[in-house]
Image (cartoon, rainbow, N blue to C red):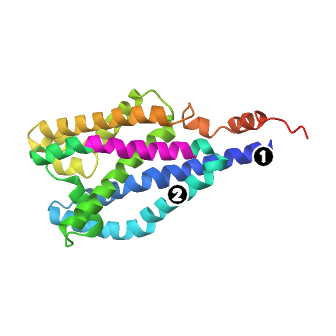
Amino acid sequence: MSETNRIDVKRLLLVLITLWTGSAATIFLILLASGNALLLQGLTKMSQVIASMHAFANVYVPLVWLPSLAVLLIVAFYSQRRFPALTNRIWAGLGAGALATFLLDFFRQLGVIHGWLGTDTSVLFGKMILGPQVGVLSILTVGFIYHFLNGASFGLFYTLIWGKARWWWGIVWAMLVELGMMTLPPMAPIFGPFGSKTGSSAYFLVTFFAHLGYGSVLGVLAQHWVKDKGTIFSLLSARRGASAAQAQPADTA
């Protein structure tokens, strides 16, 4: 029984570490950096907002974000034989989230090209991490990398929590993400909740359909790629480990 409890504690720690390093650490970079600039400091000029976000990222990226990504890789490989269900959910979530971001980005780019969105978030991300003084190509490259890692992080969170769920749960999750985007920094303080400061419904509609597409792809891929059924609680179940051990053939030697 003590062995079963140890397995349960290991799973709990590994899942919590994965939630932070694989999802929250990436998402919190933009949320905390923009929230600090727009809400705590009350900055309104975009040049000041970006400068503040870059100062925050200068500390957060090397001390929190990059180490978190390294720890995530360690957890994924450590769990590969010990807790394969967790490793499967990690790679399935990251892969599905990243691929789903391609469809989201199709709608986003349409919004940028036609002026329906007030800003190109990839440029904002790139300037936040590198600073506004570097070259445009570097800003776009780093911005796109962070953008897709952000999408992958939301995918990982989805597979960890819901597991092998019906595909439409991906849409439910994407609508929650959309709700957060419409009401939290950086977008809500700049453009108003649901784009109310833009004077047009285009901003909200573009992001809505972008996340609808993201959730559809995420849900379909996760349903096919995640191997085990059950929510996050199935990953924490010690009984699951005990059942797997009992299922092993007996040693007849």
User: What is the x, y in percent for residue 202?
Assistant: 13, 37
The amino acid type of the residue labelled 2 equals Leu
Residue sitting at x 50%, y 49% = 19
Find numbered disc 1 in the image and state the secondary structure of the residue it sits on.
helix
Residue 32 at what x, y percent from top left?
34, 57
Q: Which residue was labeled with disc 2?
A: 73
Residue 215, by quadrant, is top left
Nearest the camera: 40 or 88? Answer: 88
Identify the residue at horizontal 9%, vertical 38% (top origin).
Answer: 200
The quarter of the rendered structure image containing the N terminus is top right
Q: Is residue 91 magenta?
A: yes
Looking at the rendered structure, the secondary structure element under dot 2 is helix
Q: Quadrant of residue 59?
A: bottom left
Q: Which quadrant of the figure contains the C terminus?
A: top right
Q: Nearer the viewer, residue 155 or 202?
A: 155
Q: Which mark is residue 205?
A: none
Using the image, determine if residue 175 lies above or below residue 59.
Answer: above
Identify the residue shown where x is 9% and y is 44%. 114
Q: Which residues are magenta?
A: 87-104
Q: Residue at the far right: name it.
A: 253
Q: Most extreme residue toward the bottom, as rendered?
A: 133
Which label sits in the foreground, 2 or 1? 2
The Cα atoms of the two marked residues, 2 and 1, are separated by 26 Å
Name the N-terminal-most of marks 2 and 1. Answer: 1
Q: Inspect the image, locate mark 1, and give the three-letter code of the amino acid beneath it.
A: Glu
Q: Is residue 202 above or below residue 70?
A: above
Q: Position of residue 2 (x, y in %)?
A: 79, 45
Note whether residue 72 is visible: yes
Residue tagged 1: 3
Q: Judge from the rendering whether residue 237 lies leftward or rightward of residue 229; answer left or right.
A: right
